[in-house]
Image (cartoon, helix red, strand yellow):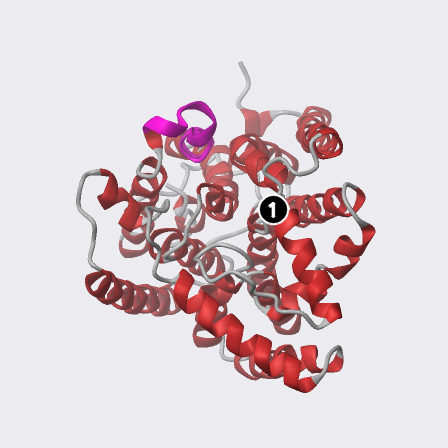
Amino acid sequence: MKNLDELQAPAKHRLMRIAWGLWGVAIFLVSILVFIHPFDTNLCSTFSPSSRNWWAGRDLYFTASIDGFLYFPQFAILFSPFAFAGNPIGDTAWRVAGLLLYCIGLWRLARLLSPQNAPLVFALGTFAVFAPALSSIRCGQANLHIAGFLLNTTVELARKRWSAAAFFLIVAFAVKPIIFVMLLLAAVIYRPMIWRLAVGLVVFALFPFATQDPHYVVAQYHACAAKLLVAALPDRAFCDLRGLFWAIGWIIPQSLLAVMQVVAALGTLALCLFAKRRWNEPERSVFVAALSACYLMLFNPRTEENSYVILAGILAIPAAVLYLNHRRLSGGATLIGIGLWFSCDGWAYHLTDPWLKPLACVVLTIQLIHVLLRPDRYAPLPTGAEPTTAVAFSSQSQTSVTSAAT
């Protein structure tokens, strides 16, 4: 039986078409569900009223609990075309937009890391992340969009397209505040990003004033800050490190959790700075994006089950490259693990919530750090067995970017 990386071009493109077909089937079936049950587990029913409230000058944050509209006012503006298109048309269009952004990001990262094997890499990555992405597509969550922005930002940083990377990060910040982790790391690791992100954030802050009365905008900013502070102190377990310990009977005190978050943030920054010195592109941008996603999954106080689609994509593509181009079974095992671990809410929700996904993330984070500290762990292929990629890494970091998923 031939190795996958030895398949002829028609077979590679056939697998790629199957992968695209899976995404097409997914959005088709979800669209039917949206039409039949428009308010069943549909988060767009939270987004749309807030968009309408914005244009009517009403309060966006009309509940005092940790739930409800947990986004910046900018998101209410950006979501307006989908809100006014109405349900189910607008809700379906929102899902299609997120899926396209995600799939394009997967494809672009596959082409970046393995130009000649991109169809196969994309196909294997799709097979790994398909199940974890289904739930986000169905619910209409913004996590799928954030995952797409992260993938595309990684590609732009690797190619030194600073303005495009800044644009993706600022728009992602408007869609969901959690991308702030990657935004800060990009500013620190990539010096040309600093002024671009600064200008982008100024435009970001002033943008709502062009659409509403200034007094109303200021009031909504105050309400947003209060809402996010309340949401940062959850009264129940979420799918993060705190939820993992909660599942075994230890409820981490909020004061201790805050210390852990700060220490982990400083550790993440230190590791990314170390990667900046040790690795070139595209290893560097992939590692920074992957580690930022790991930090987000473990230490964001409201990590949901569907949030792990953000981590799945940024790990699946390097794992596929590791398996195809370097013939490492660990890459294949990682692909299988991503597909199983990050879709566990579909096959054993009550048994695995909220501990399995954060536990898997802890394992992946340790492996990422190990790859960074021991980049020579994977030796180059022997002479006569060169990988089928056009990307030429140095002997020290030839496989480090792809092994980042293991």
Residue 27, image x and y in percent?
71, 34
Residue 201 placement: quadrant: bottom right
Q: Is residue 89 above or below residue 271?
A: above
Residue 197, image x and y in percent?
57, 78
Residue 165 placement: quadrant: bottom right
Q: Kindly identify the residue that appears in the image at 59 percent across and 47 percent down.
A: 141
Q: Mark 1 = which residue?
A: 43
> Does the magenta run of residues contain 343?
yes
Residue 63, image x and y in percent?
51, 60
Q: Amino acid at mark 1?
A: Leu
Q: Kindly identify the residue that appears in the image at 67 percent across and 64 percent down.
A: 76
Q: Is residue 373 above or below residue 389?
A: below
Which residues are the magenta region? Answer: 336-351
Can residue 362 be seen here? The reply is: yes
Looking at the image, residue 167 sits to the left or right of residue 333; the answer is: right
Q: Is residue 315 above or below residue 280?
A: above
The furthest residue to the top:
1
Residue 313, image x and y in percent?
52, 44
Quadrant where the C terminus is found in the figure: top left
Front-most of residues 117 and 178: 178
Front-most of residues 14 and 151: 151
